[in-house]
Amino acid sequence: MTKSNFPILSQKPVNPCQQGQLIEIDITDLADTGDGIGRFEQLVVFVPDTVPGDRVAVRLQQVKSTYATAKLETLIKLSEHRIRPNCIVADKCGGCQWQHVNYDYQLKTKQNQVIQALERIGGFSDLPCDEILAGKIDNFPQFLGYRNKATYPLARSVAGQVQAGYYQKGTHKLVNLNQCPVQDPRLDPLLKDVKEDIHWMKWPVYDEKEHTGEVRHLSLRIGRRTGEILLTVIARTGDLPGLETQASDWLKSYPKLVGVCLNINAAKTNVIFGSETRCIAGRPFLREEFAGLEFQLRANTFFQVNTEAAEGLLQVIAAELNLQGNEILVDAYCGIGTFTLPLAKQVQIAIGLEVQPEAIAQAELNAQLNDLTNVTFHVGTVEELLPQLGLKPDIVLLDPPRKGCDRTVLETIKEMQPNRIVYVSCKPATLARDLKFLCENGDYKLVRVQPADFFPQTSHVECVAFLVKQ
């Protein structure tokens, strides 16, 4: 028997697909990254800018053993869920993933993402999942013009003009914008005019490769209810000749503009805001009304970008808890007290925990503004602060970052044994993981799940889960 006749038992199957290959596939699903999903041979293929129901020709880019990424080449058959984008640069701009997807189908997909994560990762069945909540104005879904804050990187064109916008998908090439359909339309005039003023002021625009230049980003924030606007220029060192005069001119030109700030960020980083912010003209904050309370928001204050959707989710939380006024509530990861303060009006004691000192200072100020004396705030990590409270809360509200809760936080909660847990999440996978741990051994029972769409035109989904002690 020759060598070639011996059977090869250990060799792995060779993937017949190669980078650069052109293939045709049907798109059958949407990933939580926003990409469409199709299948070819043994591969799962991820394709941006596609919709379930599309038949497409795509060119393979990265090819792995079980999956591949691909670029859309031709739309052979259009899905019934595909629509014409509301933005003229939707196919280039990396700000949105789903401008081409019908909004009803966006909502259905996000609800399914939550259910699938809780079933597959959390191991839950017969989920008590409500229909996804969408932000509304005058009882109509608000899927455009909803963002109360937008921060744009700046660049110069080949012709030397100052540009502001978002990076093209998968690149650091800026897509220049004069307006954005998902931001509050009252910010559009400032976006167009301010970048022209920066051009005429001849301020050097930051070059991230060389770490030279000055102006890095332009940040615009608006109070949805008050209409007050805050403008922040983010610069490398702050050496911007004539800034004070220009800031005063901006205040005169835009009646709703209440403050112009300068943020200094000298670091070689993709983090937008530095640690130092100066008020150049007007005041360093805008006023906003939320859930019947007045809030002060500064340039880098974290506040949900979709005011209406956040308020809708808070109403769901308050209704589900049916507070009687004698409860002790702990709000972990409380930020500036966005949920803590409205709920404090309905409980005996409210306690907020937050690692950012600036956020706690804002929370305490907002509590004073609204004459709320039954709420206290503590600076530090939830892992450190929660065991030190020395009390048993009736309710623990969790609103962690995308990575979810540290395991020690969940263990402490199980030791404290609050009667109810409210878990607000912006990532279904980590929500499912943490709920699985909390419900292990029958300690807690998942009684309700409410998805919410805080970010229309993107693949991101918010969710709140309610647990009761068994």
Image: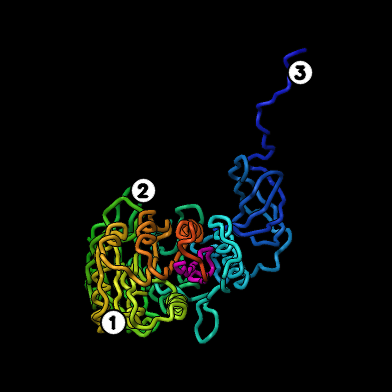
Q: Earlier in the sequence, mark 2 or mark 3?
A: 3
Please say if 83 is above or below 224: above
User: Can residue 167 be seen from the camera position used here?
Assistant: no
Please name the residue that numbered disc 1 is placed on: 252
Camera-side residue: 208 or 403?
403
The answer to if 45 sits in the magenta stretch is no
Q: Quadrant of residue 80?
A: bottom right
Above or below 12: residue 309: below
Say which element carries label 1: helix
Q: Earlier in the sequence, mark 1 or mark 2?
A: 2
Q: Establish if 353 lies above or below 184.
A: above
**First to last magenta residue range:** 449-470
* Cα distance between the residues tagged 1 and 2: 36 Å
Foreground of the two, 381 or 323: 323
Name the mark on residue 5: 3
Q: Position of residue 90 (x, y in %)?
A: 55, 65
How much space separates mark 2 and mark 3, taking CA atoms? Answer: 57 Å
Q: Which residue is mark 2?
A: 209
Q: In the image, what residue type sits under mark 2? A: Lys
Q: Nearer the viewer, residue 269 or 338?
A: 338
Q: Is residue 346 left or right of residue 241?
A: right
Which dot, 1 or 3, sits closer to the camera?
3
The span from disc 1 to disc 3 (Cα, nearest Å) is 87 Å
Seen in the image, is 172 located left or right of residue 213? right
Q: Residues within 10 Å of mark 3 (few under 14, many from 20)?
A: few
Element type where label 3 sits in the image: helix
Residue 435 in picture, x, y percent from top left: 47, 60
Q: Upstream in the sequence, badge 1 or badge 3?
A: 3
Q: Amino acid at mark 1?
A: Lys
The N terminus is located in which quarter? top right
Percent position (x, y) of residue 102? 62, 71
Q: Is residue 58 left or right of residue 152?
A: right
